C-alpha cells in the first residue's frame, strides 16, 4: 500500500514540476501577439459588414426576429449561450462594442494591461460569436480557450508597450528598473499544449469518413469554391492531391502523440506549420490557419525561438532555465 | 504543498476533461456516453471548445464533386414579375468569378450552413436580407435558388444543377 502511495506521490511530483517549473516566456509571448493580432485583424476586416453581420437589421438580428419570430434561432447546430446582442434594437451599442473589441485586442497583442484588455476582448468576442456564429469559419470558437491560456500567461514584463512606457517613466524619474524576468510558470503553456493536441484529437472523426480515407477530402476542399482561394483547375492533379490528402490526415491525426515525443515533436510541429501555411495560400477559411501556425510555436524548442530578435538577456535564459528542453 | 496536492490534481483533472470531450463518442465506452455529452455541453457553455472539424468531408466516398455554389435571389412582385436581385453578374458554371469580397463569401458560407442547421430559419434570414436589397419597392417575396456547378469524380463530366431553397415573404 505504501509502495503504491510512494509511486502516486512520485507521479504527482513529476506532474507538479511539469506544470509549475519556470519555462522561457517566448512561446506564450508569440501566442499573445498572434492571438491578439488574429482577433484585431479578424474584426478589422469585417468593418464594412458590421451592420450586416451583427447589426439589428443584419443577419438574424433584432429586427429580423421581430418580423420572423418563427425563425428566432438562425438554425446553427448548437444553441450558443450569451445571445444577448440579438436583443439589441439599435446599432450604436453594437458599434461601441465592436470598437471596444478592436481596441482591447490590439492592446492585448501589444501588451498594454494584457490580462485586463485580453479579458475584455475575449468577453466581447464571445458575445459577437453568439450573435452570428456563421461568420467565423470555426476560428472564432476555437480562439476562445486559446485566449484564456494567453490571458493567464500574459504579463506587462516582456515585449509590452505598457511595460516599456512604465520603465521609461521610471528611468526619467531616476528610479532603478528591475531587470525583466523572461520566464513564466509553465502551467498555462502546458494546458495550451494539451488543448492543441486535443484539437487534433477531434480530427480522429475523419477515420469514420470514407472521403478522408480515400484521400478525397483535401482535393475536394481545394476544388470547392466554398473554400478554395485559387482560380485553378485542380482536377487533372487529383492523384497527386490524394497522396497529399493522406499525408495531411496522418500528420494531423498523429499530432496528439507525435508533438510530445522529444526527438520528433519539433519537426512534427514544423511540418504542421507548413501544412497550415499551404492551406493559407490555397484556401480561404478565415483566420484559422494563421491561428494554428501561431500556437504550434509552443512545440518548438526555446533555443530555436530564441533566434528571433529578442533582447540579449532574454536569449541568455535559454541555457539557464530548467525545463527548456521539454517543450 | 498546495500547488502539488491541490492545483496539480485540478490541472490534471481539467486536462483529462479536455481529452475526454475531444474524443469521438464512438471510441469511449457506452456507459460514459451521457457524461461525455454533458461534459462537452458544459465546456462549450464556458466557451471552451475541445477542437473543430475543419473541412467536414462527406462520410461516403465522393461520386460527384461540388465545384461551385452560387446563390440566386429573385424578387417577386404582386403581379408575379421576377427580377434578379443577386448576383448582379450571371453565375459562372465553372469559372471563379464570384465571392472575391468577404460579403459574397459569407453568403456562400451561410448557404453551406443550410446542410447542417435549420434550413428554414437560414433561408428566412437570407430572404429577408435580399428583400432589403431589392430595387423594386413592390417586391413581395424573394425566391432563393442554389445553383450548383458539379463534376463527376471519375469521368470529369461537368453540369449545373439548380436546387430551389424556398420562397420568403418580404415583411417590412
Image: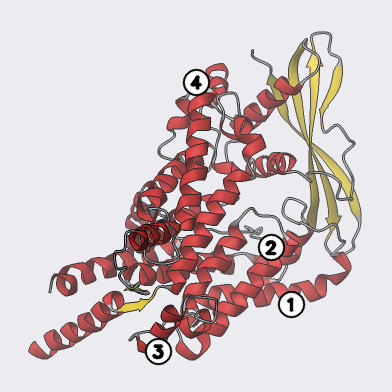
Q: Are marks 4 and 1 on the same chain?
A: yes
Image location of residue A39, percent across then percent down: 53, 51
Q: Are marks 2 and 3 on the same chain?
A: yes
Q: On the rendered image, what quadrant is the N terminus of chain A found in?
A: bottom left
Q: Residues within 10 Å of mark 2 (few under 14, many from 20)?
A: some
Q: CA distance from mark 4 to mark 2?
A: 37 Å
Q: Which residue is mark 3?
A: A319
Q: Which residue is mark 4?
A: A89
Q: On the rendered image, what quadrant is the C terminus of chain A found in?
A: bottom left
A75 or A150: nearer the viewer: A150
Kindly report which numbered mark, 4 or 1, lies closer to the viewer in this rendering.
4
**Residue B56 vs residue A104: left or right?**
right
Q: Chain letter for mark 2, please.
A: A
Q: Residues within 10 Å of mark 1 (few under 14, many from 20)?
A: some
Which comes sooner in the sequence, label 3 or label 4? Answer: 4
Q: Are marks 4 and 2 on the same chain?
A: yes
Q: Residues within 10 Å of mark 4 (few under 14, many from 20)?
A: some
Q: Which residue is mark 1?
A: A243
Q: CA distance from mark 2 to mark 3?
A: 35 Å
Amino acid at each position: 500500500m505504501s509502495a503504491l502511495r510512494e509511486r502516486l506521490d512520485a507521479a504527482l511530483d513529476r506532474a507538479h514540476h511539469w506544470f509549475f517549473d519556470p519555462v522561457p516566456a517566448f512561446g506564450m509571448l508569440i501566442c499573445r501577439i498572434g492571438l491578439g493580432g488574429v482577433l484585431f485583424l479578424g474584426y478589422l476586416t469585417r468593418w464594412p459588414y458590421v451592420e450586416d453581420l451583427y447589426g439589428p437589421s443584419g443577419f438574424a438580428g433584432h429586427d429580423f426576429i421581430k418580423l420572423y419570430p418563427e425563425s428566432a434561432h438562425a438554425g446553427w447546430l448548437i444553441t450558443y449561450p450569451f445571445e444577448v446582442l440579438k436583443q439589441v434594437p439599435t446599432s450604436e451599442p453594437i458599434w461601441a462594442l465592436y470598437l471596444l473589441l478592436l481596441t482591447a485586442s490590439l492592446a492585448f497583442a501589444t501588451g498594454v494591461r494584457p490580462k485586463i484588455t485580453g479579458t475584455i476582448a475575449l468577453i466581447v468576442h464571445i458575445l459577437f460569436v453568439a450573435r452570428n456564429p456563421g461568420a467565423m469559419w470555426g476560428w472564432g470558437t476555437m480562439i476562445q480557450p486559446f485566449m484564456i491560456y494567453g490571458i493567464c500567461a500574459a504579463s506587462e514584463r516582456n515585449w509590452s508597450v505598457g511595460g516599456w512606457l512604465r520603465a521609461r517613466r521610471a528611468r526619467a524619474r531616476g528610479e532603478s528598473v528591475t531587470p525583466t524576468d523572461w520566464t513564466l510558470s509553465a502551467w498555462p503553456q502546458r494546458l495550451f499544449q494539451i488543448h492543441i493536441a486535443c484539437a487534433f484529437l477531434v480530427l480522429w472523426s475523419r477515420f469514420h469518413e470514407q472521403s478522408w480515407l480515400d484521400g478525397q477530402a483535401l482535393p475536394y476542399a481545394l476544388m470547392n469554391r466554398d473554400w478554395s482561394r485559387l482560380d485553378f483547375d485542380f482536377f487533372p492533379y487529383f492523384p497527386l492531391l490524394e497522396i497529399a490528402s493522406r499525408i495531411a490526415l496522418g500528420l494531423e491525426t498523429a499530432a496528439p502523440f507525435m508533438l510530445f515525443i522529444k526527438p520528433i515533436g519539433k519537426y512534427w510541429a514544423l511540418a504542421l506549420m507548413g501544412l497550415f501555411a499551404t492551406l493559407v495560400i490555397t484556401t480561404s477559411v478565415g483566420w484559422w490557419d494563421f491561428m494554428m501556425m501561431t500556437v504550434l510555436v509552443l512545440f518548438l524548442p526555446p533555443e530555436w525561438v530564441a533566434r528571433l530578435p529578442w533582447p540579449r538577456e532574454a536569449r541568455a535564459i535559454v541555457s539557464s532555465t530548467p525545463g527548456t528542453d521539454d517543450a | 504543498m498546495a500547488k502539488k496536492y491541490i492545483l496539480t490534481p485540478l490541472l490534471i483533472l481539467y486536462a483529462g476533461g479536455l481529452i475526454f470531450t475531444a474524443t469521438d463518442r464512438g471510441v469511449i465506452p457506452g456507459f460514459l456516453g451521457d457524461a461525455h455529452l454533458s461534459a462537452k455541453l458544459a465546456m462549450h457553455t464556458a466557451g471552451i471548445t475541445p477542437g473543430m472539424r475543419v473541412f467536414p468531408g462527406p462520410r461516403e466516398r465522393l461520386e460527384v464533386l461540388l465545384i461551385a455554389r452560387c446563390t440566386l435571389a429573385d424578387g417577386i412582385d404582386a403581379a408575379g414579375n421576377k427580377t434578379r436581385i443577386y448576383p448582379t453578374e450571371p453565375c459562372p458554371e465553372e469559372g471563379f468569378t464570384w465571392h472575391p469580397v468577404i460579403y459574397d463569401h459569407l453568403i456562400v458560407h451561410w448557404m453551406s450552413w443550410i446542410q447542417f442547421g435549420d434550413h428554414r430559419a437560414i433561408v428566412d434570414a437570407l430572404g429577408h436580407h435580399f428583400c432589403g436589397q431589392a430595387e423594386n419597392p413592390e417586391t413581395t417575396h424573394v425566391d432563393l435558388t442554389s445553383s450548383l456547378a458539379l463534376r463527376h469524380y471519375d469521368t470529369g463530366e461537368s453540369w449545373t444543377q439548380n436546387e430551389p431553397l424556398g420562397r420568403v415573404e418580404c415583411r417590412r
